[in-house]
Structure formats: C-alpha cells, structure tokens
Image: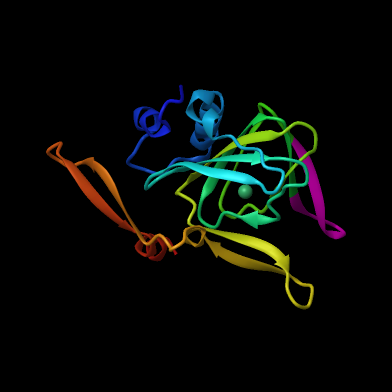
Amino acid sequence: MTRPIGEWIHEHVPDDRDLNQPELARLATIIGELPDLWRDKVRHDAGKRYYDQLYRDSHVDVWLICWLDDQKTGYHDHDLSSGGVYVCEGTLIEDRFMFSVAGLEHSSRERPAGDSFVFDGAYIHGMRHAGGPPVTSIHCYSPPLWRMGYYEADAQGSLSRMPVTSIHCYSPPLWRMGYYEADAQGSLSRISMTYLDEIAESA
Ligand SMILES: [Fe+2]
C-alpha cells in the first residue's frame, strides 16, 4: 500500500526554511529509495514524457518523472530554484553546454540508476532517456519551482532563453492555494498563498 508522501515529508523535512543542495540530494535519494511513497504513480507512456507533482509546500516541491525512448526535456534552467535528482531505475543522459577554447560545446554524461546530483537555479542542462529500460526519477526543488528558462533558437537562429511560468501548467491558472497548518496556539488554520506574491517577492 502506498504511504501518503505529504505525511512522510512532514515527519522528516524542516518546514520553516528552504533546503540547501546537499539536503535536496538526500531528500531525492531517500524518497527514490522508498517506492511505497510513489510506485502507484509511475506511468511510462510512449506518447509523451510523464510527470506528476508528488508534493508541494512553501519550501519544497517533489516530482516523479517517467521516461521512455526519445523523451527529453530540452535545455533549460530552474530560475531561482536549486534541485536534487535521484535516478530510481534505468539510465538518463544529462546534456550541458561547456565553454572551451573553441567556444561552447555540448557535453553529455550518463546518470544511471542509483545516481544523484544537484544544481543551483542558474545551472543549464537537458535531460533525456538513454534508451533501454524505462527510467523513473525523483526531482526535488527548493524553493518550489515557479519559473524555468528554456533555451531555443530565435527567428535568426541565435540561442535565446524563453521563460516559462509553472502556473501555466494549470488550467484555469492556479493563483491562490490554502495550506492548513497549526497556528501559534496549535489550532488548525488556513494560510493563504498567492502565487503572484511569491513571484514578486522572489524576483
Ligand atoms: Fe532540470
């Protein structure tokens, strides 16, 4: 039986601050090695890369991503969020741009099952399935992922950054949510969170 991941996170993760990169690597690894927290969400779909947000609060969000042949993210950054990734099964390839005397070059490395890695918000990479068995991976971000930048060719073929806001993932757009926590007296209370306020504060 799958255990609610929110319950597990509330027991094991500080809820009053953002997590640093070593903490994100640890969190992704521990969640990745506890399939009872996510196994029933796994879907490998030949038509598109499958992803599911397992958890989100004010300081961290956790995603499950399932990959099959030729599925990839494209080059992107994570704006203001640091991240930690754990590969649960299969092998991913991580692509990066590297400076060399000849200019920018592509560089790739394998991220096999059991591998974990971290990055800050400015880090640019692309992830793709390496072929072979399906891949399942756990991705943790702190602060939670609000925006990303995607790197594509503009009309003249120059590399350019396209900002994408996570709230575009929801239809209609998700502007506010209520989180239920204990107040100073221990009573259950609703904390209202407006996405636009979060963006304005962090910009
Ligand atoms: Fe990424």
Total marks shown come to 0
Q: Is residue 183 left or right of residue 56?
A: left
Q: Quadrant of residue 137?
A: top right
The residue most toward the top is: 1
Q: Is residue 72 magenta?
A: no
Residue 61 higher or lower than 2, as above or below: below
Q: Which residues are magenta?
A: 96-110
Residue 194 falls in image quadrant? bottom left
Of 7 and 142, which appears nearest the observer? 7
Query: Does 157 sit above or below residue 47?
Result: below
At horizontal 56% and vertical 52% (from top left) the residue drawn is: 121
Residue 53 is situated, as x and y percent measured from the top left of the image, at 49, 44
Q: Position of residue 107 (x, y in %)?
A: 80, 48
- The question of residue 101 being in magenta is answered with yes
Percent coordinates x, y for residue 193 in the rendering = 31, 56
Q: Position of residue 43 (x, y in %)?
A: 61, 37
Quadrant of the rendering where the C terminus is positioned: bottom left
Q: Is residue 203 left or right of residue 14?
A: right
Res. 129 image quadrant:
top right
Residue nearest the observer in this picture, 35 or 142:
35
In the displayed orientation, state which residue is furthest to the left.
185
Give me the residue at 40% from left, 45% from top: 59
Q: Looking at the magenta stretch, what is its main secondary structure?
A: strand
Q: Residue placed farthest to the right in the image?
A: 102
Relative horizontal placement of residue 46, taking residue 202 as reference (left or right): right
- Please, which residue is most extreme toward the bottom here? 156
